[in-house]
Image (spheres, rainbow, N blue to C red):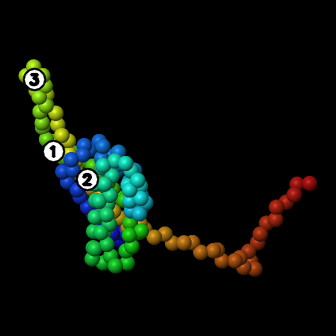
């Protein structure tokens, strides 16, 4: 059975739309590659995603019965960005007017899973005496 680990970061003060720009970069990648990409991504959301990704990897390694697991065996199975409650604020304008705006927040959930090991196919056994091979005929 594949190991699954989850890490959540809640009430992040970044709008969900900006957070999704970063999460699309690392979806489905191994953890090592995802962290390398996030380290060179010039967005503030990349720091939050990297921090949560490291936490999810640590959670996977600390689960019971995962002594055989290595960090390079993990990949990002699912990464969700959901809207959190928005704070309503006002901005005072000229002539006594007030404009309302929302400070949007989001929740980030990262699920990691162990990459299934593929069996390396061995070389086919050499054909015995009974195996017949056809020679290509030349049509001259």
**Front position among marks 3 and 2:** 3
User: In x, y percent, where is residue 20?
Assistant: 32, 46
22 vs 47, nearest the viewer: 47
User: In x, y percent, where is residue 46?
Assistant: 33, 52
Q: Which residue is mark 3?
A: 97
Quadrant including the N terminus: bottom left
Q: Which mark is residue 123?
A: none
Q: Looking at the image, is mark 3 or mark 1 earlier in the sequence?
A: 1
Q: Which mark is residue 85?
A: 1
User: In x, y percent, where is residue 109?
Assistant: 26, 55
Of helix, strand and loop, which one carries label 3? loop
In three-dimensional space, the C-alpha distance between marks 3 and 2, rounded to whole angstroms, equals 36 Å
The crowding category of the residue bearing disc 3, from other C-alpha atoms within 10 Å (few below 14, some 14 to 19, many at least 20), is few
Q: Which mark is residue 108?
A: 2
The crowding category of the residue bearing disc 2, from other C-alpha atoms within 10 Å (few below 14, some 14 to 19, many at least 20), is many
Q: Is residue 119 left or right of residue 80?
A: right
Q: Looking at the image, is mark 3 or mark 2 earlier in the sequence?
A: 3
Could you tell me which residue is drawn at 35 percent across and 69 percent down?
2
Of helix, strand and loop, which one carries label 1? strand
Q: Is residue 38 left or right of residue 98?
A: right
Could you tell me which residue is drawn at 34 percent across and 47 percent down?
43
User: In x, y percent, where is residue 135?
Assistant: 82, 65
Among all residues in the image, which is located at the extreme left?
Answer: 96
Q: Is residue 60 left or right of residue 123?
A: left
Image quarter of residue 111: bottom left
Could you tell me which residue is drawn at 45 percent across and 70 percent down?
117
Q: Is residue 49 above or below residue 73?
A: above
């Amino acid at each position: 059975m594949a190991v699954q680990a989850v890490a959540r970061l809640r009430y992040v003060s970044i709008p969900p739309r900006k957070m999704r720009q970063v999460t699309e970069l690392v979806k489905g990648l191994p953890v090592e590659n995802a962290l390398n990409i996030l380290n060179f991504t010039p967005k503030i959301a990349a720091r939050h995603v990297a921090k949560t990704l490291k936490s999810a990897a640590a959670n996977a390694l600390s689960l019971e019965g995962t002594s055989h697991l290595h960090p390079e065996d993990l990949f990002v199975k699912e990464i969700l960005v959901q809207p959190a409650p928005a704070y309503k604020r006002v901005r005072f304008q000229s002539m006594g007017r007030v404009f309302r705006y929302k400070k949007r927040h989001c929740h980030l959930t990262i699920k990691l899973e162990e990459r299934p090991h593929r069996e390396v196919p061995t070389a086919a056994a050499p054909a015995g005496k009974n195996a017949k091979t056809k020679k290509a005929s030349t049509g001259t």
